[in-house]
Amino acid sequence: MELPWPHRRCIVCLRDDVPMTRAHLIPESLGGFVWSQTHCAACNNGLGTRVEAGVKHDPTIRYTIEHALAAELPELVKAFAEGQPYVIPSKQGPLAARYRDGAVELGTTKLDDGSLVQERDRAAQTIETMLERAGANAEERHAALERIAAAEAGEVVDLGRGLAIRHGTTEGGSITFDGQRVSDEFPLAIAFHLLAFFVGDLIYGAALEPLRATLRGDSPLDESEVVVESLIDRSTGYVPQHLLGLSRVEPHIVIRVQLFGPPVWHVHLLRVKAPKLEPIGMMLDVQTRDVYPAKPATAG
Ligand SMILES: [Zn+2]
């Protein structure tokens, strides 16, 4: 769904001599479906790789999409989880894993003692390759693979040429999240994009240059310009909806970004004043792809 934008000028780099592209208000990987021609391709891609990519590792967002809303948003869960790094607990410590074709599979983890942990079939291939490199002939390699197949769990099997294997098990295949929270630039990018629709071409003004510089990756977020409060609102349940709003206009603008219920950011734009604006909110329904007016939520 397009939000019309009458200007042909990028709101981040201010260039007007390059084509504009579809910039999503909330990333498509989070079910975002509202976009506008407000960003040039370079700025849009830059934000995508530098800023939005981090959202896929954010434990709060991951929990929300992959667990809390898994039943409501199956397609989104699938797309979101595909190729994502996971960690599976085991007696040997945390093991690297990935999600592919609807299942979690082990990757390769190197333990402190130098040994490798891999899934059974892949480990057999690795061993065959290592034996081959060590000069083992086909017969020797075949014998080693037979010994691997016959090994009991927990038993250390010597394969010759300095190699040994042991079958182990992962603990229930449960998943833990070890990602970092997404950076504050993420809610800032959403807030700035949204702000454009409240202030129109004032978004190009010199007063907002420090925010643009941060969004371009030219300078770190300046706490005298922006303060981002990140919180978990436990008073609300998980819902397949996003809430965006201008929650305060005085003494400075506060934009609320609320994704799927509990994860909330209040983006305080300390130097941006717009007393003529009214607090306003909108709800984006990820399932129906409809946008509704919503009560402007007050900042915390
Ligand atoms: Zn640009």
Image (spheres, grey):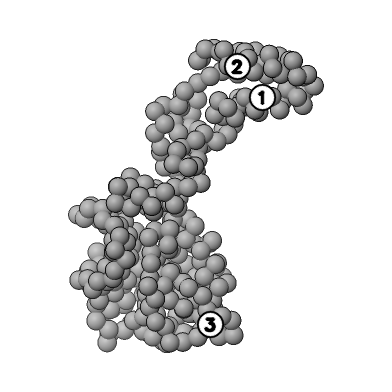
6 up-or-down from 257: above or below: below
Residue 148 numbered mark, or none:
2
The x and y percentages for residue 273 are 33, 82
Residue sitting nearer the eye, 24 or 245: 24
Mark 2 CB near ligand 1 (8 Å cut): no
Residue sitting nearer the eye, 268 or 170: 170
Mark 2 vs 1, N-terminal side: 1
Q: Secondary structure at mark 2?
A: helix
Of marks 1 and 3, the one in the foreground: 1
The residue that label 3 is drawn on is 14
Q: Which image quadrant: the C terminus?
A: bottom left
100 up-or-down from 137: above or below: below
Q: Secondary structure at mark 3?
A: loop
The residues tagged by marks 1 and 3 sit, at their Cα atoms, a distance apart of 56 Å
Q: Which image quadrant: the N terminus?
A: bottom left
**In the image, what residue type sits under mark 1?**
Ile
227 up-or-down from 169: above or below: below
Q: Secondary structure at mark 1?
A: helix
Q: Residue at x 69, y 24 (%)?
A: 128
The x and y percentages for residue 178 are 44, 43
The residues tagged by marks 3 and 2 sit, at their Cα atoms, a distance apart of 62 Å
Quadrant of residue 185 within the rendered picture? bottom left
The residue that label 1 is drawn on is 127
Q: Are marks 1 and 3 in contact (CB under 8 Å)?
A: no
The residues tagged by marks 2 and 1 sit, at their Cα atoms, a distance apart of 10 Å
Left or right: 70 with respect to 234? right
Q: Residue at x 48, y 42 (%)?
A: 101
Mark 1 vs 3, N-terminal side: 3
**In the image, what residue type sits under mark 3?**
Leu
Left or right: 276 with respect to 167? left
